Amino acid sequence: MFNQPIAVWAIAFASIIAFMGLGLVDPILPMMKDQLHATDSQLTLLFTSYNAVMAVAMLITGVISSRLGIKKMLLTGIVLIALFSALAGSVNEVMGIVWLRAGWGLGNAFFVATALSAIVSLSRVGVAKSIILFEVAVGLGISVGPLLGGELGAISWRSPFYGVACLMVLAFCCILFMMPKSNASTVKTIRKKVSLLDPFRALKHRALLIFGISAALYNFGFFTLLVYAALVLGHLHHLDVHGLGYVFLGWGLLLAFTSVITAPKLQQRYGTIKAMCMQLLLFAVTLFVMGYWTTDKTVIIAMVILAGAFLGNNNTLITTAVMNAAPVERPTASAAYSFLRFIGGALAPYYAVKFAEWFDFHAPFYIGGGFVVLAVIFIWVNRKHLKHVDEAEAH
C-alpha cells in the first residue's frame, strides 16, 4: 500500500492539512467564547457553516472538476482554504469567522471531492487499499488538527488559522510540482458525461441513498462528540487549550490507527454491513456513557478517545461500501453520499447546544447516541438492498 508514486504522497500530505480544519477549532472554542464574547450557539455555527457549504458544494464539484481537471481542482481548493483560513484569523468578531469558515468549507469540498478519486487513479494498488491510504491521511489530519489548534492556540486564538494558511501554501507547492498534469483528452471525455443532476440521479440507487441517510444520522453523534464534548470539557471541567488538544489528538490517532489496521480485518471477518452496524452501536454506547457521567471529567476524556476507534473503523467501512454501492462513477457516488453526510454534520453542532438549552447538559449526548442507533436500525432494516456490497468486497 505504501509503494506509491510521489504524486500520491503529495495528495495525501495535502489531505492531512485539509482535514486539520475539522478539529482545529475544537481546543480554542472556550478561548474564543471568552475573548470574542460569543455564545455557545454562535460557536457551533463555525462548524455548521463549514459543513453546510461543503454539502451543497459537493453537488457541483463533478461538473467543475470535469472542466478544470483534477490537478487544477485540487489547487483551487487549496487556494480557497488558505485564503479563508488566513482571513478568519484577521477578523475580530465570531460571526465574521462563521462566514469565512463557509468559504473554507467551499475550498475543502473542492479538494476532498477530488483527492480520493485522484489517489485511486494514480495509485499502484487497488481501490480498497487506496481508500485505506486516503483514510490514513484523513485520520492524521483530524488528529493533528486539535494538537495544532491547542499548541498554536496557547499563543493566540488567531494562530491556528494562520498556521493552516501557511501549511496550505506548502501543500500547494507539493501538488503543483509533484503531480502530473491532467490528460486533456480524458477531461474532454468526462466533460460530456458529467452534469449537475448526476449526484441526484445516483441517489436513485437504493444502496447509495441508504448509506447517505445513515451517514447523516450518525454524523449527529459524530459532531456532538467533536463540538459539544469540547465545550463540556472546556467550560464544565475547565480543561485548558493544551489539554483539549491532547484529548482530541488521542481521539484522532486512534481513529487513524483503526481505519488502517482493524477495519479491513473486521470487514473480512464479519462483512461490511454487519461490521459497520457493530461499530456504530459501540459508538452510540460511548455517547450514552458520556450522557450519564457528564460531570465526570475522566469518563468524558476516556470516552472521547475510545470513540475514535469505532469511528475510524466505521469511516473506512462506509467509504469502501459507498464506492461499491451503485454502478456510477466514483466521484459522482462520493458527491451524492457526501451531500447527505454533511447535511447531518451541519445540523448537529447547532442543535447539540440547543438540546442542552432546552433540556439539560446531559441531553445532547443521549440524543446524539439515539441518532446513531437510528442509523443502525435504518441500515439493518434495508440490509437486503446492500447484499451486493458485501459480495463485491468478498470478490
Image: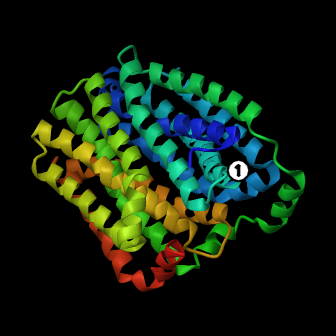
The colouring scheme, among rainbow, by chain, secondary structure or one colour, is rainbow
Residue at point 47% right, 60% down?
341
Image location (x, y in percent) of residue 388: 51, 81
Decide if residue 375 is in sight here.
no
Residue at point 35% right, 27% down?
28
Q: Nearer the viewer, residue 39 or 105?
A: 105
Residue at point 50% right, 25% down?
161
Local crowd at mark 1 within 10 Å, few (<14), some, or many (≥20)? some
Quarter of the figure that contains the C terminus:
bottom right
Q: Residue 107 falls in which quadrant of the image?
A: top right
Q: Is residue 331 left or right of residue 224?
A: right
Q: Nearer the viewer, residue 170 or 213?
A: 170
Q: Residue 170 falls in which quadrant of the image?
A: top right
Residue at point 40% right, 81% down?
383
Residue under label 1, please give it. 122
Image location (x, y in percent) of residue 281: 26, 64
Q: Is mark 1 on a helix, strand or loop?
A: helix
Image location (x, y in percent) of residue 320: 51, 63
Q: Nearer the viewer, residue 336 or 196?
A: 336
